[in-house]
Image (spheres, helix red, strand yellow):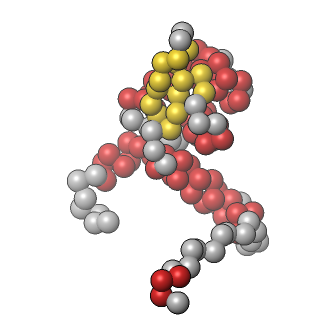
Amino acid sequence: MDPDSEFVDLAAEVLGLLSDPTRIRIILALRRQVELPVKALAELVGKKPSGVSQHLARLRMARMVTTRQEGTSVLYRLADEHALTLVVEAIRQAEHAVSNGQIPPHHHTPHPAPPRDTAAD
């Protein structure tokens, strides 16, 4: 990526939108469940449904979440993996910031080996 990219200002807006702990918790909650209504998300993140609804509206305007109507319920889901990737990487960076020179927890988790190209064998 080029520092002169036309998307730098928009990237700053995305990072700003994800700088709220409730929105981070919403993203993480949607990681575990494919779709959730506002009430279930509110319970998972420990906030009132009205506040979670406002956060979801901002995430929806930024196209980080999408909705689907099911009867009288509106179900929310992540639009793609990018917001989740940003949140996970931010949490990993936070782990480094407080590790005091120790190996942060995410480095203790085994990462799966990349798939082998059996055609080359």
Judging depth in this view, the residue of 77 and 62 nearest the camera is 77
Residue 80 visible, this angle: yes
Q: Farthest residue in the top direction?
A: 72
Compared with 4, 116 (above or below) is: below
Residue appearing at x 25%, y 59% in the figure:
5
Q: Farthest residue in the bottom direction?
A: 121
Residue 55 visible, this angle: no
Measuring from the top left, give residue 22's x and y in whole percent: 61, 33
Residue appearing at x 46%, y 50% in the figure:
82
Residue appearing at x 71%, y 29% in the figure:
44
Measuring from the top left, give residue 25's x and y in whole percent: 63, 37
Measuring from the top left, give residue 39's x and y in whole percent: 65, 18
Quadrant in the rendering for residue 45 = top right
Query: For the image shown, how many numbered marks are present on the structure?
Result: 0
* 109 relative position to 33: left or right: right
Measuring from the top left, give residue 48's x and y in whole percent: 66, 17
Compared with 100, 21 (above or below) is: above
* 92 relative position to 59: left or right: right
Compared with 17, 12 (above or below) is: below
Residue appearing at x 68%, y 59% in the figure:
95
Compared with 73, 87 (above or below) is: below
